[in-house]
Amino acid sequence: MCIKDRPIENIDNRIADLNVIARIGYWEFDVDSARYRLDKVSYDILQLPYGAALEDRETETYCQNKEEWALVNDLIANTAKQKKPFHHEVELELPDGHHIWLLLIGKINHDADGNIKVSGMMQDITHRKEFETELTQKNELLNFTENKAALGHWKWDLKTDLVNCSKNIARIIGVEYGTVITIEELINGVHPEDFELVRDHMANAVKTKSFDPLFHRFLLDDGSERIIEVLGEAVLDDSGELVSFICSSQDITTRKQFENELIKKNQLFVVAQQRAKFGYWQWDPKTDSVSCSENMSRLLRIEENTIFPIKDLIKDVHPKDMDYVRSCLDNIVKTKIFNGFSHRIVLNDEIRYVKVYGKVNTDLNDEILNILGVSQDVTEQKKSENELLSRNQLLGFAEQISKIGNWQWNMTTNIIKWSTNLYRIFEIEENSEIHFDTYFGYVHPDDKEMVRARINSLAENKNFESVIHRIVLDNGTIKVVELLATVNLDDSNNIIEMLGTLQDVSEQRSEEIKFKGLLESAPNATLIVAEGDTIQMINKQAEHLFGYSPEELLGKKLGILVPSRFEEQRIPQQKKFLENPVVQEMDLGEDFFMKHKSGKEIPVKVTLGLLEIDKGMLISMAVRDITTEKLAERKILKAKEDLETLTRELTAQNLQLADFTQITSHNLRAPVSNLNSLLDIYKMMDDEEERKELFKKFETVIAHLTLTLNTLINALSTKSSTSVECHEVSFSETFKKTKEILTAEITRTKAIVKSDFSKVDVIQYHNIYLESIFQNLIGNALKYKSPKRIPQIEVSSEIHKGKVLLKFKDNGLGIDLARHGNKIFGLNKVFHNHPDAKGIGLFMTKTQVESMGGKISVLSKVDEGSTFIISFK
Amino acid sequence: MQSPFHLCIIDDDDIYRFTIIQSAKFLEIEHKTSVFVNGEDALNFILENQNNPAALPDIILLDIDMPVMDGFQFLEEYKAIDPKINRDIKIYMVSSSVDPEDIAKAKSYSMVVDYISKPLTPENLKQLVADI
């Protein structure tokens, strides 16, 4: 193979020069012969011996990166087959171990002989790539879009005066890829100040049939300014007529900045001095001598215009960054490529951030002449960057903590973006591609319809209520989420974007469910009432107690359950409770009732409690139905009364029983034992005369026994007379009748018997009893008169504490009550050695009074008189 | 024991008094009888004779239920004067009462020798006299 016909040599010299500068090489691939042809620059870029055969196995070894090489071959083969141009960036490893980035552009064409050839250009874009890498790595100012915009290509057809442009250019100038545009449209975005320059350059290019490298500024949509380098090639036809220009526009902002800085060194130096943030230095690693700008020397506290070793340049570097800085510098020397880096310095005890970038100048033998560097103080920038970073982190944390994620759905592009935390909530890998179905696919089957309806309603009404639904994660976990959404509309009210948040409320939900469970398990009806008296939650027991369904009560005022008469007291009580929220029973100072749906009132006891939630205070009201208690209470009260009555009755009966015991032991046993004794004597007696005497004794005892038995029968019949008929009886009438019966006695004793029934005269009573009472008491008064005085007896009535009192007062012998008080009304009790005292009268009187529910008592002083007082029921 | 035997009956029941006196007579107990219809009369008698022990009875048959001063009231009064009396008087409560309360109360007095429920039979009386 002849070396001489390998290289492409028939390239315009000027272009060749340019290409050398721009490191653009040309190449050709003959499909039939499967041979490559490269120009000098290409060989240079690839660091291959000039004229080496690329397809040769031998040269293959030069390309260390086999995979990439295979890719390149594929690309070319593909182009040949499908006749499609390619545009590819590839990283290759060179024989010296360096990596270079190559931009390969290829297209198919036919030569005069009809051979199919793939030809194109290659450009060493390592420099740019490195900047790019650096920028990406260091998260520098360039954004992704700008990165993408780094390089574009366009072809200017002079016959039609129209431009075909690459995808990148089309995107930047905002036309659809494939559209043919005018030169005016192409340069529309050029910085106004450079506009004339660009136009003139174009015109000049047409005139001279050559396209000199052009630098101009370009304004991006976001207003940022980029510096563009345009390299162009004139395409001439066989007759030497200019047909078109094929150009590449490259964003060299970063590179240009540096170049500009170098060019405008002095100016920048001044600026740098003013800002005190720039330092410029030059380092010759072979001699390790550094010179620097004035400002830099001032910062380094080194005398101006002196030469010093590199270690002095980096003496202020933060100790922790020192190794890094050294390795960066070593790397620059080794690779002869200035990879910018950042580090910290400690200046006046303050930490500042410095960004270093620069260029390695090499001689023709690729030996380093010197290294130029610019150190820039980027502390402020770094600070804001950090701040932004920390804010982002904070937001991230906040989202994480509150389990809220946010999302954006661009309806135009149909692209959905999720925040990091949203991915986390769904437990899917961050930055996975999201479609509507991705989200919808996670919605719990039972909730799908509801969610779809809600989203549809959002699309229609542009209004979205939050919706709580469940999602099922890939691992089967069910979460409860709350979805909130809003829309952005364009001028014609079309939705262009939906955005919103999604919060994982599983925990709250489970808390709520737990709480609800607790509520349901509460033994009493429980109402949860929010401030403002709105019923928020009720349990089953409450539904049951009040007869309402939850729907009928939730959101309603508590007043619906409280009779209106309590409202006046209840509301201040509630306020008082909120001021001092300790669990307490609601006390309205009276029995409290609540209202059933039917209007029926239910007696209740209400215990108030307070629940604090995120949104404020809730009052819990545990309502206890005390209907049964009330009934029981009433029953108990009744029973108690009955019991008291019974006790009274039993006590009375007991007393009567005691009376009867007394009566049987004394009044019956005594005569019986006497009879027995008399019989014993009778048996011993043989004298008829004495026996006759004895029989008299028998008669006395039998008479006595008969009287006692008669009295007892009388008393028994009185005591059993609970159904005795009562009539209106008059005291005065009864008094008059009694006086008539006792006329003989009154006359004999010359007694003065008076009465006063002016207060009360008529009562409901048993007339026989009343007559008996009058006769007994007046009779007693006459019987036990004082021998020293004419008897004076006064009977009167009065009302005392609602009861009728009847008094019998005399001036007779009186009774020693201290001695006889306890048995004055007993049967056969006599307190006087009076011949007629039989002890029957008072016993009968008491029996008659008590049988009608009354009481009898006595006041008396010996030798002064007695007063018997009867209190009627 | 001095002669004649002195029996004292305090009871308002004349039939009972009659039967006791008759029984004593039939039992041929040589005796002298004092009779009081209530406690007060009996107490007065004792008080009058407290310095003359020979006039005081050997046995008192004391009824409970009596007018003016009953048996228990008598015992209360007697208790106060008992230490001053230089004579051993045996008091028997004789009543028709079968009330345990009365019986217990009677026995609570140290000077009461026994409680006898009526009727007091001649055999009982004989035994009482024999015990002295």
Image (cartoon, rainbow, N blue to C red):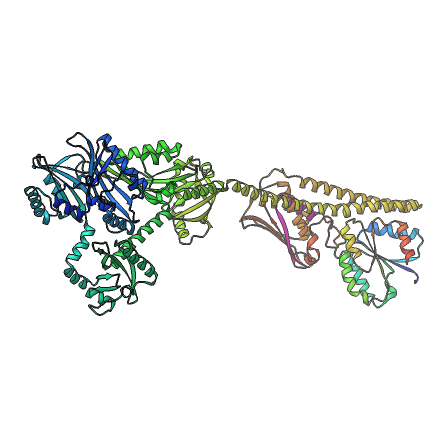
Q: Which of A605 and A811 is in front in this view?
A: A605
Give residue A770's position: percent from left, percent from top: 62, 44
The total of numbered circles placed on residues is 0
Q: Which residue lies furthest to the left in this view?
A: A207
- Asked if one can make out residue A261 in the rendered structure from this viewpoint, the answer is yes
Residue A2, above or below B57: above
Can residue A741 be seen from the camera position used here? Answer: no
User: How far across and down, in percent of the image, does residue A91 sit?
Assistant: 28, 44
Viewer-nearest residue: A576 or A440 = A440
Q: Between residue A750 and residue A6, name the one nearer to us.
A: A6
Image coordinates for residue A251, horizontal then vertical, percent:
19, 47
Which residues are drawn in magenta? Answer: A841-864
Residue A857 belongs to the span the image colors magenta: yes
Residue at coordinates 56% horizontally, 48% vertically from top-left? A803
In the rendered image, which quarter is residue A450 located in? top left
Assign the N terminus of chain A to one quadrant of the image: top left
Q: In this view, does A398 lie to the left or right of A664?
A: left
* Residue A726 vs residue A125, the one in the foreground: A125
Specify the quadrant of the image occupied by residue A58: top left
Vertical placement of residue A353 versus A840, above or below: below
Q: Would you say A443 lies left or right of A838 here?
A: left
**Is residue A695 one of those drawn in magenta?**
no
Where the C terminus of chain A falls, by quadrant? Answer: top right
